[in-house]
Image (cartoon, grey):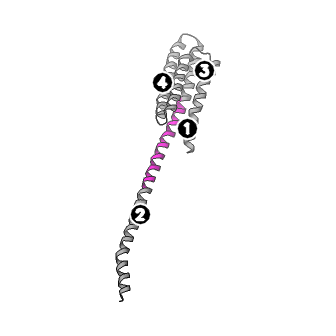
Amino acid sequence: MSEREATIRTAVVTYFPMFIAALSLITSIFNGYLNSKFVDLAHHNVERTEYLKTCKEVIDAYFQVKFRADILSETAARGAGAAANAASVAQIEAGNAASKFAALGTYLANLQGEAAREQYTHLTWELEKIVREAAKTPPADLGKLFEQADRMFSAMNNDCVRTAKQ
């Protein structure tokens, strides 16, 4: 074996394992990066799913407030007597529906920024005001009570739709 072949063989025996080790290190780093991306993706997906589930519940709660306010208004419009007892039950149920909306809205707002938190708070206050005034409002005028709340709710619902499309 010539001196040149010995030098090449020595270089190959020395550098080839280092080359394999460097490739292994690069592969390991890339695998760590991909795992990190996968964990982020899974975390985002769980977060998004929870948010959308809560959106569904808050939408249901909003329409429960509307339904309960309608019952409260109709019960109060019937007059005194047995309707007074039914009105107090309807008042409690409407207040409960508004409280459920407030709890779910607060949870959703906490997943977003300060501006969303303020919007959800104002919508909750508006719904609580509507529940208080529903018994004094004729059923035909109940839609006017909900005008501002419906606009606020529409903005909140747009947030849910935007998140669903991501």
Report the mark closest to the observer, 1 or 4. 1
Q: Residue furthest bottom?
A: 1
Question: Disc 2 residue type?
Answer: Ile
Please, is residue 61 above or below residue 81 in the view?
A: below
Please provide the residue range marked out in magenta: 35-61
What numbered label is drawn on residue 96?
A: 4
Q: Is residue 7 magenta?
A: no
Q: Earlier in the sequence, mark 3 or mark 1?
A: 3
Residue 124, image x, y percentages: 51, 25
Q: Quadrant of the C terminus?
A: top right
Quick one: label 2 or label 3, which is nearer the N terminus? 2
- Residue 37 lies, in percent from the top left, at 45, 53
Residue drawn at the location 59% of the way across and 13% of the way down = 78
Circles 3 and 1: CB atoms closer than 8 Å: no
The answer to which image quadrant residue 64 occupies is top right
Q: Quadrant of the N terminus?
A: bottom left
Q: Look at mark 3 in the image and give the residue it sits on.
A: 145
Q: Indicate whether residue 50 is drawn in magenta.
A: yes
Mark 1 closeness class: few <14, some 14–19, many ≥20 residues within 10 Å: many
Q: Which residue is mark 1?
A: 160
Looking at the rendered structure, the kind of residue marked 1 is: Cys
**Mark in the foreground, 1 or 2:** 2
* Number of the front mark, 2 or 3: 2
Quarter of the figure with residue 130: top right
The residue indicated by pointer 2 is 26
Which residue occupies the foreground of this view, 137 or 86?
Answer: 137
Q: Give me the C-alpha separation between circle 1 and circle 2.
A: 41 Å
Residue furthest out toward the front: 3
